[in-house]
Amino acid sequence: MKSVPKQSEVNELVEHHQKLARRVAELDRRAFLTPTEQWEARQLKKAKLVAKDLIATRLGGSK
């Protein structure tokens, strides 16, 4: 039996995902990224996907 996720937990995940999305968008708007910024963008995109999967899992949806 699955436990029902707390709404605050889901809200925190959504806020985290949005924060990551804003930073990715900020980097995407730049004409040129340093190697460090390129690495950061890749890591942020991975973290954003993980957060999205966690949200879907907590809400009982499929990936």
Image (tube, helix red, strand yellow):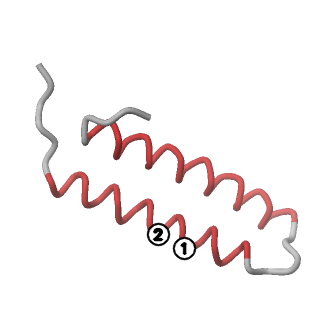
**Who's the residue at 71% across and 53% down the image?**
42
When the figure is inspected, residue 22 is found, relative to residue 40, above or below; the finding is: below
Q: In the displayed orientation, state which residue is furthest to the top.
A: 1
Q: Which label sits on residue 10?
A: none
When the figure is inspected, residue 22 is found, relative to residue 6, above or below; the finding is: below
Decide if residue 30 is on the left or right side of residue 32: left
Q: Which label sits on residue 22?
A: 1
Q: Which amino acid type corresponds to the residue marked 2 in the rendered image?
A: Lys
Q: CB under 8 Å between callouts 2 and 1?
A: yes
Q: Quadrant of residue 37?
A: bottom right
Q: Residue 29 or 62: which is nearer the viewer?
A: 62
Q: CA distance from mark 2 to mark 1?
A: 5 Å
Q: Residue 63 or 20: which is nearer the viewer?
A: 63
**Who's the residue at 47% across and 69% down the image?**
19
Decide if residue 33 is on the left or right side of residue 45: right
Say few, some or many: other residues with alpha carbon within 10 Å of mark 2 (under 14 / 14 to 19 / 20 or more): some
Q: Considering the image in quadrants, where does the N terminus appear?
A: top left
Q: Which residue is mark 2?
A: 19
Q: Quadrant of residue 33?
A: bottom right
